[in-house]
Image (spheres, rainbow, N blue to C red):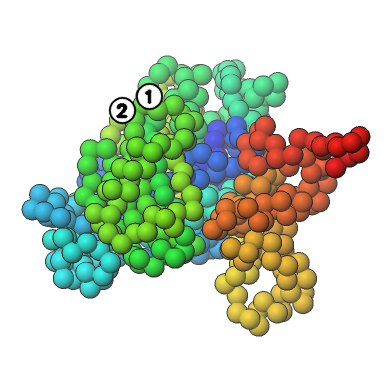
């Protein structure tokens, strides 16, 4: 029997597994998809928020500021792309200036370090490509950007290296309580656990209601984005927000850790949990709103549009609590923005709750808390030469846009949680993330996956179950082609 079973392995489930793996516990992580970080975690703004936006006194405010500092530390230890670039919230009129000062006061109360209000000249000196119409801005130097799926994968891989068990393609469709244990059914498989952590994101209410009386409801909110080529990446060097509204933090313009520019999102509530389609109307709104902040964005340099769905709830705050009707069943739900930033701190809260339910926490004598990862592109010429001499696979560039080598792809395939799809490789080493979006390297990644996993080429999927790339061979004139 497992001491703790975690349902879902997005950023919240991964952070919880990472934190729990510090202790002598038997941990299972059940993920319904064929890879981790496959929902909201892979489709968001990739921002590490400073913490001025949440209302003081809320769990969201406290965990945002704590999670900000924890994310920086974890990223350094686990070789995750992270950059503390700072953020600006722009004011365009007197009402916006009142909002800026309100956010400043909240930031001070919440403990955001170094926060300050700038006038228009100071703001434009920092970011000369901003609109000349701005009246001032709120500056938070602790704002940052991160690779969200890489952070999730790094924490999950580390948890596995420390003994946690991960089960993919394991959708929990039935839960029963037998004595002091929970039986979690994934089709014809059953996992037994003394405690359960529900980190199922957009489906956390459905999972909760399998065993407990309804206590909350998830309201999906879709946000659409532009990802622009690196030619636009230098337009701004900080995260640029407009003043927040009741539907969220608004459309942002931000550099990414890979040198691109991300623009978005809009906010459309009431969509289907898994609806990640984009619409012309939504993208037009994003575009028209963003140029108010940065007029010079060249949207003809867009290399991809995408949408992510956030797990809002009817509660204003995060839901981090044990069920009232199912003891030992803890839900981490309604984790909207700043959920990515808060994830490591939410995991700490979960550990405290588990301890209060009777889980004995004894720290391991040896805990692996580092991860080494080759980033060939960032190496010096001498370092590259030495690496290629040691392993010639690093001398073969597979993804030309992002300079990703075969050595890095092979490393990814043999990482603790084995990626089995082309998109799973993309999340781990960035192959296919560049201007051509995998048009050149996709088939080569597919071949390497088949070779390293020892499976037929046609069994390699693009991403989710059923997304076959090859379905057979064509014939012409009776001959195989």
Residue 295 image position (x, y, % from top left): 27, 59
The residue sitting at 69% across, 58% down in the picture is 409
- Secondary structure found at label 1: loop
Is 48 on the left or on the right of 387, as rendered?
left
Residue located at (73% from left, 71% from top): 395
Q: Quadrant of the C terminus?
A: top right
Tell me which corner region of the image, top left, top right, bottom left or bottom right, holds residue 69: bottom left
> Of 150 and 251, which appears nearest the observer?
251
Q: Which percent across, then down, holds residue 139? A: 24, 63
Answer left or right for 176 relative to 97.
right
Q: Are circles 2 and 1 on residues that touch, CB within 8 Å?
A: yes
Residue closer to the observer: 78 or 226: 226
Apparent side of residue 44 relative to residue 394 in the rendered image (left or right): left
Q: In the image, residue 117 lies at what x, y percent?
A: 16, 63
What residue sits right under mark 2 in the picture? 314
Q: Residues within 10 Å of mark 1 (few under 14, many from 20)?
A: many
- The quadrant holding residue 241 is bottom left
**Position in image of residue 64 (x %, y %):** 34, 50
- For the residue labelled by badge 2, is the local secondary structure a helix, a strand or a loop? loop
For the N terminus, which image quadrant? top right
Name the foreground residue: 120 vs 141: 120
The residue that label 1 is drawn on is 217
Residue 350 vs 178, above or below: the answer is below
């Amino acid at each position: 029997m497992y001491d703790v079973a975690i349902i879902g392995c997005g950023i919240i489930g991964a952070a919880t597994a990472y934190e729990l793996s510090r202790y002598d516990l038997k941990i299972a992580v059940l993920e319904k998809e064929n890879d981790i970080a496959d929902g909201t975690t892979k489709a968001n703004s990739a921002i590490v928020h400073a913490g001025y936006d949440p209302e003081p006194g809320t769990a969201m405010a406290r965990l945002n500021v704590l999670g900000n500092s924890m994310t920086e530390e974890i990223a350094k230890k686990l070789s995750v792309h992270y950059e503390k670039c700072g953020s600006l919230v722009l004011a365009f009129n007197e009402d916006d200036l009142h909002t800026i000062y309100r956010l400043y006061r909240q930031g001070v109360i919440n403990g955001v370090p170094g926060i300050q209000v700038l006038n228009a000249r100071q703001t434009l000196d920092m970011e000369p490509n901003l609109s000349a119409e701005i009246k001032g801005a709120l500056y938070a130097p602790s704002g940052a950007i991160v690779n969200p799926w890489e952070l999730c994968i790094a924490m999950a891989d580390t948890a596995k290296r420390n003994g946690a068990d991960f089960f993919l393609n394991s959708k929990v469709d039935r839960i029963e309580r037998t004595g002091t244990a929970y039986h979690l059914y994934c089709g014809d498989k059953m996992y037994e656990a003394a405690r359960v952590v529900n980190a199922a994101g957009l489906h956390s209410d459905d999972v909760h209601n399998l065993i407990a009386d309804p206590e909350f409801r998830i309201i999906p909110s879709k946000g659409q984005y532009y990802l622009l080529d690196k030619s636009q990446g230098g337009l701004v060097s900080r995260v640029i927000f407009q003043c927040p509204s009741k539907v969220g933090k608004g459309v942002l313009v931000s550099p990414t850790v890979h040198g691109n520019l991300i623009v978005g999102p809009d906010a459309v509530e009431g969509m289907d949990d898994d609806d990640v389609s984009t619409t012309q109307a939504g993208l037009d709104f994003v575009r028209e709103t963003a140029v108010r902040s940065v007029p010079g964005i060249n949207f003809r340099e867009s290399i991809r549009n995408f949408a992510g769905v956030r797990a809002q709830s009817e509660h204003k705050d995060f839901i981090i609590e044990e069920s009232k009707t199912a003891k030992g069943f803890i839900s981490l739900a309604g984790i909207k923005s700043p959920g990515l930033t808060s994830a490591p701190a939410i995991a700490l809260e979960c550990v405290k709750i588990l301890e209060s339910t009777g889980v004995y926490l004894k720290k391991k004598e040896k805990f692996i808390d580092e991860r080494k990862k080759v980033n060939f592109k960032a190496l010096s010429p001498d370092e590259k030469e030495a690496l290629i001499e040691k392993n010639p696979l690093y001398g073969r560039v597979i993804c030309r846009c992002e300079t990703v080598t075969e050595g890095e792809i092979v490393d990814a395939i043999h990482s603790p949680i084995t990626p089995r799809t082309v998109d799973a490789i993309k999340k781990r080493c960035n192959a296919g993330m560049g201007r051509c979006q995998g048009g050149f390297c996709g088939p080569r990644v597919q071949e390497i996956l088949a070779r390293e996993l020892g499976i037929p080429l046609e069994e390699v999927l693009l991403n989710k179950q059923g997304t076959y790339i090859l379905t057979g061979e064509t014939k012409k004139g009776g001959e195989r082609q």
